[in-house]
């Protein structure tokens, strides 16, 4: 999936990998980033399964990035997914 975001002269700009963007934002962990991820999820730009699968795919390679703590990122991903799953269940009950 790609989403057009702008044009400068003859150059067109698109977003492509929303799941990777969500992981990058979770790695930073700022409130604004988390709000961005929630908005992306609500627009159905990625699924929670895709987020979990993407993290599991990259987790073994995170050792190559000393500034990233794999345990902290895993906890952020799991917490984010749990919160949204609970929110989705609340909507289903209404």
Image: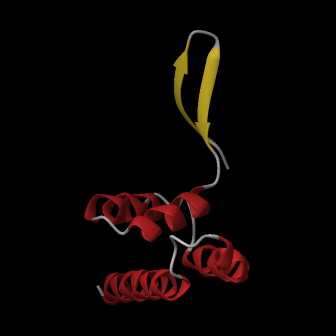
At 33% from the left and 90% from the top, the residue drawn is: 93
User: In the displayed structure, would residue 33 be above or below residue 29?
Assistant: above
At 45% from the left and 88% from the top, the residue drawn is: 75
The mark tally for this picture is 0
Which of these two is toward me, 62 or 23? 62
Q: Residue lying at the far front in this picture: please name it.
A: 66
User: In the displayed structure, would residue 5 be above or below residue 83?
Assistant: above
Q: Position of residue 13 (x, y in %)?
A: 59, 29
Which of these two is toward me, 10 or 40? 10
Q: Quadrant of the C terminus?
A: bottom left
Which image quadrant for residue 33?
bottom left
Classify residue 63 as left or right of residue 37. Answer: right
Which image quadrant for residue 85?
bottom left
Which image quadrant for residue 32?
bottom left
User: In the displayed structure, would residue 12 be above or below residue 84?
Assistant: above
Which coloring applies here? secondary structure
Q: Position of residue 61 (x, y in %)?
A: 72, 76
Q: Residue lying at the far top in this picture: please name it.
A: 9
Q: Position of residue 26 (x, y in %)?
A: 44, 69
At 31% from the left and 62% from the top, the residue drawn is: 35
Classify residue 14 as left or right of residue 88. Answer: right
Which of these two is toward me, 61 or 46? 61
Q: Position of residue 6 (x, y in %)?
A: 51, 26
């Amino acid at each position: 999936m790609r989403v057009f975001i702008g044009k400068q002269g003859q150059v067109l700009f698109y977003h492509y990998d929303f799941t990777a963007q969500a992981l990058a934002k979770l790695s930073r962990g700022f409130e604004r980033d988390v709000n961005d991820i929630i908005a992306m999820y609500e627009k159905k730009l990625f699924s929670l399964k895709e987020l979990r699968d993407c993290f599991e795919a990259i987790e073994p390679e995170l050792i190559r990035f000393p500034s990233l703590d794999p345990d902290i990122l895993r906890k952020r991903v799991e917490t984010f997914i749990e919160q949204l799953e609970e929110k989705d269940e609340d909507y289903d009950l209404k």
